[in-house]
Amino acid sequence: MARVAFAPAKVNLYLHVGAPADGYHPICSLMAFADVGDAVSTFDAEALTLAVGGPFARDLGADGDNLVLRAAKALIAEGRRPLPPVGISLDKRLPVASGLGGGSSDAGATLRLLRETFGLAVDNARLEALAAALGSDGAACLWGAPAIAQGRGERLSAAPGLPALDAVLVNPRVPVSTAEVYRRYDASGRFGDVTPPAAPDAFEDATELAAWLAGLRNDLEAPAIATAPAVGAVLETLANEPEALLARVSGSGGTCFALCASDIEAESLAERLEAMSPSWWVQRCRLGGPWPDPA
C-alpha cells in the first residue's frame, strides 16, 4: 500500500534578516504552517523515479534538480545500505517560487516518508541536519510545526503558543526570484536586527497576535515588491479588506497572507478575492501545525 506524506505551506509571520556574513544572511522568523500544501507518496518502480503531477507541476525545473530527489538521495547515502528501488510521486499544489517553502516542505516530507517506508536508522537530529542542508527553510519544514528559526534557518526554538489562525493566502501567479530579492535587499544597505523579539508565552486570539505582529516586519517585503510589482498589488488589496487583521508578504514573495478573526471572515475574504481577481491563486487555510499525513 502506498504511503503518503503531507508537505504543508510555510508562512513567515515575521521575517527579520541581518547583514550577510560568510555568504549567508542570518534570520529570525516565526514560522507557522498551513493545512494546505503538496503531497508526496511512494509507488513501485524499478529504479529511483520521480513523477510530478498537480496544478503547478509544469512550473518545476528539471527532475534531476528537484529537492524531492535530492532529499531521497541524501537519505539513501545516510542510511549506508542499499534500498529497494522506489518511485516517488509529488502532487504539486503550491505555487513555485512563492515564499511558501514548497520545495523545502516537499523535501522534508520525502525524508520522513522514506525513513518510515524503509525503517532507516536515522534519528531525528540527523534527519533535521539533512533537511537543513537542502535549504534555509529545510529544518523547520521537516516537521511542519510552528517554530522560531534563527541562524541560516537551521536553529529552531519553540514558538509562543498560537491560537487558531484562520488566514487567506494569495499569490498573483508570478514567480519571484529569491536571489534577486536578496540582491535588492543587499543593495539597500538597510539590514534588520535578528534578536528574537520579546513575546508572551502564548497569544489568546488572532487579534492579539496580529497586533503584536504589526510591530514587527518582513525585511524582504519591499525588495520582493520591487522585484515583482504584482506582489505589491496583492498586498495592497489585502491590507484594505475589512476582514484582514494583518496583511504581509511571506518569505521572499510572492505569496501574501491575511490573518482573519475566524473562518467565517476568511471564507468571505477568499470568495470576494476569487471573484475580484480570478487570475490569482487564492486559498483559505488554517495556520498552525503540525498537520497529519493523509490517510
Image (cartoon, grey):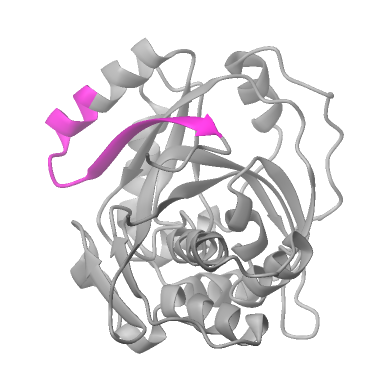
What's the residue at 82%, 55% (across, down)? 193
What's the residue at 50%, 67% (across, down)? 107
Residue 233 % position (x, y): 32, 45
Along the horizontal axis of the image, is 114 left or right of 240? right
Along the horizontal axis of the image, is 18 left or right of 184? right
Quadrant in which the C terminus is drawn: top left
**Span of residues in magenta:** 271-288
Q: Nearer the viewer, residue 270 or 59?
A: 59
Count how many numbered circles sit on residues in the image.
0
Residue 205 % position (x, y): 63, 13
| Residue 287 belongs to the span the image colors magenta | yes
What's the residue at 75%, 70% (across, down)? 126
Q: Nearer the viewer, residue 151 or 155?
A: 155
Residue 170 % position (x, y): 33, 42
The quarter of the picture where residue 88 lies is bottom left
Residue 36 % position (x, y): 38, 40
Quadrant in which the N terminus is drawn: bottom left
The quarter of the picture where residue 276 lies is top left
